[in-house]
Image: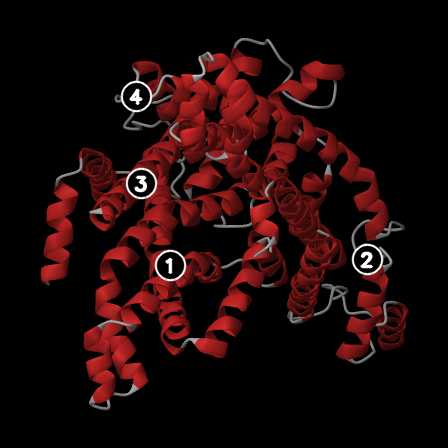
Amino acid sequence: MLRYTLRRLLGAIPTLFLVIVLAFLLVHAAPGGPFDDERALPADIEANIAAAYHLDEPLPMQFLRYLGGVVQGDFGPSYSYRDYTVSELIGRSFPVSVHLGILAMIVAVVTGVSIGVIAALNRNSALDKIVMGFAMTGISIPVFVIAPVLVLFLAVKLQWLPASWTGSEGASRLLLPVLSLALPQIAYVARLTRASLIEVLSSDFIRTARAQGLGTAAIVRYHALKPAMLPVLSYMGPAVAAVLTGSVVVEEIFGIPGLGQLFVRGSLNRDYTLVLGVVIFYATLIVLLNLLVDLLYGAIDPRIRRR
Amino acid sequence: MSVVARIWARMRSSKTVMVSGGILCVIALLAAIGPWISPNEYVAADFGNILRAPTLSAGHVFGTDDLGRDLFVRTMMGVQVTFAVALVASVVSLLIGVLYGATAGFVGGRVDAVMMRLVDTLYATPFIFFVILLLVVFERNFLLIFVAIGAINWLDMARIVRGQTLSLREREFVQAAQLIGVSTPRIILRHIAPNLVGVVIVYVTLTIPQAILIESFLSFLGLGIQEPQTSLGKLVNDGTDQMEGASWMLLIPATLLAVLLLCFNFLGDGMRDLLDSRQSR
């Protein structure tokens, strides 16, 4: 298990390195500098600014300096938020996104698995078909369509829930964002659970359990659910990535001061260092979470480790 | 064209494929002719009818937006963009994916290992953020978005094509071609590629919703298609800002985007089922 963990950990390093190199080169391939303005600055001031941000050094030097910083969690100063470093901005906004993301993931897994189990047990019934039709709809419709429509009906028309983050408190303001983020994932998890539970239920050891006189509930609870959860677990990596991407629009729609909103604002303001930092941060997070899922998978299913 | 004819015959046997394909054709036709027969222009403001709800009498069947622009023409324009994205992204992912996958699969050995390792590495990187970075750094233009989307989608295609090529490589007709001294690029183009058509068509349909999603996501954030041009993602965003007084501005483009994505997803799923049933037979 240790060898497997180490091998996987080492495998993630080239990916991360590639991400940083690509992102860095992209930003530095930009036509013009970050301080180009309508009004030309005096030459010595321009030189001073360039020196302060190390823009006068050759590109490889700049890259090594940046890489050194990134390894220590320092993404440099933000260009548009004066007096803030990118790390400070990320540190301030990320907890809000994590809170939202974790809640959405919990809702997605609990609801998705329950729906999937019900559908699998009533396979090919009318209920199954309706539920899976909804699941296909949930998968197809993007978060940025679901969220505004939910706001329109639940917040604007019915006024059950607050439409925005600011000016409201507690659980009520969390409900709509979490629901918007979770809905597509509920659909995916439900489909995966249904398909894999149907497969597991047709295997020999389940037939043996049935022959011993166990009821359906006990079979699902004690024998079938655990192996059926493996595909769901391996979906957790992509799910986290999807929730992260979704949080970018959800935070924008509800005005939540999280990392996604920071990223969008930075993109629209052309804050190069901020966007570069957030991209690398997101990429690292996704790669590490994928790794974690793989390791968990290996821990649960010994067949994987031996490959 | 017997391959295409066979695929068509099989497609006709699936209700899912025919219904979703039919709806897509109707919407495409409407988007192609609609703006042409409508008396309104997509940039022209009708100042007497600002934020007008959908009505037949004023000549704005989908209503107007906060600048008095006709939403039918603008929505249809958005649909055109959606189909353009689907087309360009498919072509780009097809070209890169098929060539890359077929080369890796056919050459095999160390070249294959390195090439597929690169695909795995790229697969683990969150591309959408890179596209956003690309759009921040360079001018936000149409073409860049389209190509970027296609460039994301080729990875799946490369994997599938490689797998297929691996099995095709061992077939007698390929060995025969090698025996009489046909060059490798020519074998890939003449003997391998035509046999991949079925699989490739299915996987192209499966990647289309993905491409549409990315474009509308970027446009929603204001990083994609720019004013006065528009796309469904941008229209949904405009509608979000105006939802309190003008819910049609949100609901019409949102519904259309949802229907398009749903149909493309069902089409892809249906096509894959057709392919699977053939393979399992």
Query: Depth-wise, is mark 4 or mark 1 nearer the camera?
Result: 4
Marks 3 and 1, how far apart at CA: 16 Å
Contact (CB < 8 A) between labels 2 and 4? Answer: no
- Amino acid at the residue labelled 3: Asp
Q: Is residue A126 left or right of residue A211?
A: left
Query: Depth-wise, is mark 3 or mark 1 nearer the camera?
Result: 1
Query: Mark 2 — residue?
Result: A75
Q: Could you say which is closer to the camera, residue A249 or residue A294?
A: A294
Query: Depth-wise, is mark 2 or mark 4 nearer the camera?
Result: 4
Marks 3 and 2, how far apart at CA: 43 Å
- Asked whether residue B129 appears in the rendered view, the answer is yes
Marks 3 and 4, how far apart at CA: 18 Å
SS type, badge 2: loop
Q: Which chain letter matches label 2?
A: A
Q: Which chain letter matches label 4?
A: A
Query: Depth-wise, is mark 3 or mark 2 nearer the camera?
Result: 3
Residue plotted at (24% across, 71% down): B171
Query: Mark 3 — residue?
Result: B269
Query: Depth-wise, is mark 1 or mark 2 nearer the camera?
Result: 1
Query: Mark 1 — residue?
Result: B160
Query: Mark 4 — residue?
Result: A124
Q: Specify which label sits upstream in the sequence, 2 or 4.
A: 2
SS type, badge 4: loop
Q: Quadrant of residue A140?
A: top left
Contact (CB < 8 A) between labels 3 and 4? Answer: no
Q: Could you say which is closer to the camera, residue B57 or residue A178?
A: A178
